[in-house]
Image (cartoon, rainbow, N blue to C red):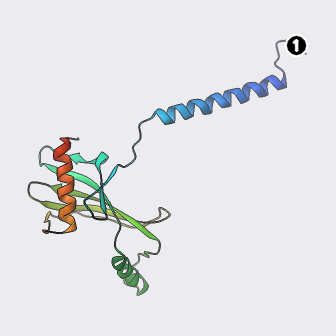
Amino acid sequence: MSDNVPSERSLTLGGTMKLQIFFLMAFIILNAAPSFSAEWVQAGNTVWYFDKSRIKYDNKSGDLLVWEKGILNDSTIKSFQVDFDNGKSSNDYTGYDHTISQVRFNCSNETVSLISYIDYRYNGEVICSYKYNLDYQIVAPDSTGEVVLNTVCKYVKDNKHKNK
């Protein structure tokens, strides 16, 4: 056997070493990459949260584009499930976990417009999702919506959040 030809053992060790280096480099790169996970902040004492890391501010209109996360109350879920059981809805809410919605807030006018929402099960499966093209609605005083609006608007004002 020629001295220039590597043995089977050296090929295996070299391949193993290269694989280890590859996984080590992948681990370092993935851990050094910025995280794009949500940063949910509770709105008052409600079951609604907003993602402070994804608030978008429109300099022209003054609107805020906000992602919200909430948990619908049991009576709402039961009514949805009754509609499903009675054939009035195609959405089975068994295993419901949470809702993610996207809204537009106008802090100066105290108005809100729902853009979309998605209902999820515990396992991450989508129950249903809808997109809307709704006009702005005035937020009712002393409502959960008012708490969320005021919390988000205060957060943006306090943090001078001028984001894209």
Residue at 47%, 65% (x, y): give it.
122
Q: Is residue 22 depicted above or below 147 in this figure?
A: above
Relative vertical location of residue 157 with respect to residue 150 in this rendering, above or below: above
Which quadrant is the N terminus positioned in?
top right
Count how many numbered circles sit on residues in the image.
1
Q: At label 1, which amino acid type do we have?
A: Ser
Q: Residue furthest right?
A: 1
Q: Answer above or below: position of 159 versus 148.
A: above
Of all residues shown, which one is farthest toward the bottom? Answer: 86
Taking 75 as reference, is 28 left or right?
Answer: right
Name the side, left or right, on which 129 lies relative to 106. Answer: right
Q: Residue at x 26, y 58 (%)?
A: 43
Question: Tag 1, which secondary structure?
Answer: loop
Residue 53 in picture, x, y percent from top left: 31, 45
Pinpoint residue 82: horizontal percent, then vertical percent. Answer: 39, 84
Residue located 31% across and 65% down the image:
47
Give the image location of residue 161, x and y in percent.
20, 42
